[in-house]
Image: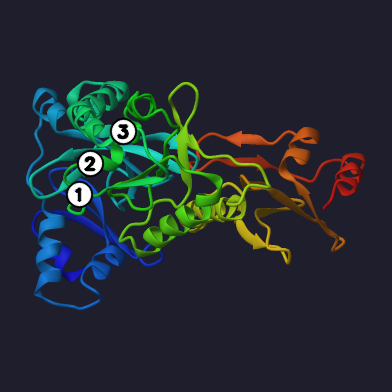
Amino acid sequence: MEQVRGYEAVEFAQFDAEGFEIAYRLRNGYAAKLNLDTLYRRFEGKISAEVFDAVDNLLLPPEAPAGWDEVSPKLRPVLRRAGYGSVQVAGRNGRDLVLTRPALPYLSELVVIDMPSTVQFVTRQDLSRWGVDAEQVYAAAHANLTELAMNTMTAFDPPEGVRVLDFADDDGENYVGSLPLVAGWLAGVRARTGTIPLLFLPSHLGMLVVLGATPAAMPQLLALAAERYEAALRPLSAVPYTVDDNGDLMPLSVPEDHPAYGEIQHAQAQLAVGAYRAQTEKLRAEEDREGAIMELLHVRAPDGAEYTMTSWTDGATNLLPAADFICFVTGEGDVFRVAWDDVSALVPLELAAEYDPPRFRVHDHPPVEVMTRLRALAR
């Protein structure tokens, strides 16, 4: 914080102990967050001159191009955890929101300005300054990856057996991990190889593409993705993704008797709980929150099955995360859990659209007759 506040260019800076990051705004309007966990992991926890040099480079990037014609060729799409990107800086214009939209469950698409030594996230204020809308920004960012998308096609041929292609981006400069966002790219892979590709995004850099994946090979592939996820400087997701009939990216869904069903459930729960944990901490720190911010829990049953669960307490407004089960906690000490789909069939769960990842606004418990029916559905 002393180093950050020591720069004349820094207008405001605020340390977030829970997020272990410094949110700051420069006098030129640029706002961002300095993630200390990532910084210290990068240098293996050693405090050295290299750390302070890195802060210099991260904190004071060169001026981004000001006009749309100059900036549009430098735009690139990127994937981040849902909820990533809001910057809270006290004392000025409140919140400067990074441009973001849902891409996959618990993953969002953002856009960066690619500059020689750093990247700068596009914000809502940038749209006003450039005189464009969000769709124009996303379209330009995707178009800038067209050449890369075409060049990667030479790596794909019909596989003989299971084939794993590791598309690395160690320095974060080629954006190959963003190609799944480009319309038609995965569909092109499927057409060229004659197989339905499998995709892993364990880190925010690079990706793994698997051709010819068989059910028997899936547990080993999930183990590889989990290993990459745990070792990543900025982990993203260990969930396997594939392409639907329309060529769109989607999470892989398998039946309960699939050899990798348990591993996939674990990866999906891990992703959801991580996204909601960060959101819960942020919302609970806000003084003007509207109700109880309920947690998402990752539960492992004695038989090894994994699922997510949240709680609905009576007599208050609850903001529930999406979960596999809802646990009802009554004033009489009665506690029982019901599958989310069973609850939503009997009770209207109001989507609170302002939250990402999504939350559902509920108030008092349902009437006695509905609670009786819910108890009968308890598992």
Rendering quarter of residue 210: top left
Q: Residue 29: x percent and y percent?
A: 18, 43
Label 2: which residue? 175
Asked if the residue under mark 3 is in contact with the one under mark 2, i.e. CB atoms within 8 Å, the reply is: no
- Which residue type carries mark 3? Asp
* Label 3: how many Cα within 10 Å (few below 14, some 14–19, many 20+): some
Q: Residue 201: x percent and y percent?
A: 38, 47
Asked if the residue under mark 2 is in contact with the one under mark 1, i.e. CB atoms within 8 Å, the reply is: yes
* Label 2: how many Cα within 10 Å (few below 14, some 14–19, many 20+): many
Nearer to us in this view, 355 or 185: 185
Q: Earlier in the sequence, mark 2 or mark 3?
A: 3
For the point 17% across and 45% down, which residue is it? 119
- Which residue type carries mark 2? Tyr
CA distance for labels 1 and 2: 6 Å
Nearer to us in this view, 129 or 272: 272
Q: Earlier in the sequence, mark 1 or mark 3?
A: 3
Q: In the image, 229: left or right of 145?
A: right
The residue lying furthest to the front in this view is: 160
Q: Residue 121: x percent and y percent?
A: 24, 41
Label 3: which residue? 157
- Which residue type carries mark 1? Gly
* Label 1: how many Cα within 10 Å (few below 14, some 14–19, many 20+): some
Label 1: which residue? 172
- What element does badge 2 sit on? loop
Q: In the image, 253: left or right of 58?
A: right
- What element does badge 1 sit on? loop
